[in-house]
Amino acid sequence: IMNKKRTRDDGVAAEASINKNKSDWWHDLSKKLSITGKTSTDNEEERFRSFFRVSRKTFDYICSLVRYDLEVRSSSSGIIDAEGRVVTIEKQVAIALRRLASGESQLSVGESFDVGQSTVSQLTWKFVESLEERGMHHLKWPSMNEMEEIKAKFEKIQGLPNCCGAIDTTHIIMSLPSGEASSVWNDPEDNYSMIMQAVVDHEMRFRDILTGWPGSINDYGVLKNSGFFKLCEKGQRLNGPMKELQDGSQIREYILGDEGYPLLPWLLTPYQGKDLSPVKMQFNAKHKNTRSVAERALTRFKATWRIIDRVLWRPDKHKLPRTILVCCMLHNIVIDQGDELHTNVRLSRDHDIGYNQQLCQSADRNSQMLRDHLSKWDSSQRSESKDSMSPDVQYLGIRGPSQWSESKDSMSPDVRDLGRRGPSQWSESKDSMSPDVRDVGRKDPSQHIESKKFDES
């Protein structure tokens, strides 16, 4: 009986010790932050959010996603801090989040948590690997019901009917060693960079992500090589119900993009040129105000997860796309959990400071008719005129797959499906490394995109 009681007491004591360690790491860190002046508020919740960019509730949820993986991996490695204490799962997640949220050096993050630089590197990568697998349900294309709500919300912004989202790209700037600093990574603004393409919904949530392509490639080139493009061209995405307008015509599903993208049946871009009619100027204004949600999303993304916003010092270009992807998941998790936007995050700034607007002249004829129809229909709605365009303008079907010419002198990275883990296949380039391109624009997570030469034409 005494042995049973002693065993039970030992178990209670061990559990109490674990719970104490879970809270101690934040108590100790919070005191250190007050002393060093890294936070300026006495409110514990605000201090926590300021440091990690997530609420305590969201932090606990993230811990629940990665706990199993980190426990399995930690049991064999026995991660210990400078005081000789086992680093709890909560503290491991905190270290990784701080590294991603602040962009501070591994040494600086380690000093905050009393662990070494190598421990910060090790824990951050374990976290990235785990969340990439466990958090994919936070980064997915909308269901039919979700899409109906998204289209309704987009229409409320500026009145554009059946709009499903907005697309944009941003550059992640890198400092590369001389051996890797090839022209393929050198972008038009003379930075070495990696590109991220995002399709965004009305709540600034990422619905499709592609990253890993080098900065020398323009927006159109990145789009053409994405799984999202291929699905749209095959009629497997943006293929939902058409919307009937008051004039009897029907509008297909589409997304909005800026002047750097081609005008396609499923991708509407603004009118280009200086001498535009009032109708076209009005359409452009509505187009810009509606698609600005993508610009704000990327601004929020980079201002929150600052490791992406800083110049990355000699990053591993095979690992960087996975880190970017996980930051995208964290961006969505914060939105899904209902966290308020932190006061330190300003959405007014440019997410691609110093980059000029690219221009693409490619335009599909039927898409021009669709855009003209939308702009004239909108104008007639404003003037309450009955003289609208003929409802015969109803080319809103799905284009067949386009035939793109192959570029012989380009990289050929292995574009691999993010819904599936496994060893990456690298294709070597003589003058640069070929990154692992992370592409969530696939309908079936069990399918890998075939590796092919990059089309820059």
Image: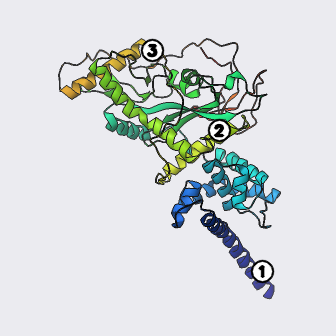
Say left or right for 180 vs 242: right
Residue under the point 55% across and 42% down? 302
Say left or right for 143 vs 134: left
Q: Earlier in the sequence, mark 2 or mark 3?
A: 2
Badge 2: residue crowd in 10 Å (few <14, some 14–19, many ≥20): some
Front in this rendered view, residue 145 or 96: 96
Q: Visible in this render: residue 56?
A: no
Q: Which mark, by number, is residue 7?
A: 1
Vertical comparison of 358 with 320: above or below: above
Q: Amino acid at mark 2?
A: Val
Front in this rendered view, residue 305 or 325: 305
Front in this rendered view, residue 313 or 204: 313
Q: Amino acid at mark 3?
A: Ala
- CA separation in Å, label 3 and label 1: 75 Å
Badge 3: residue crowd in 10 Å (few <14, some 14–19, many ≥20): some
Residue under the point 31% across and 19% down? 373
User: Can you identify the residue that label 2 sits on?
Assistant: 311
Say left or right for 167 vs 73: left
- CA separation in Å, label 2 and label 1: 54 Å
User: Can you identify the residue that label 3 sits on?
Assistant: 363
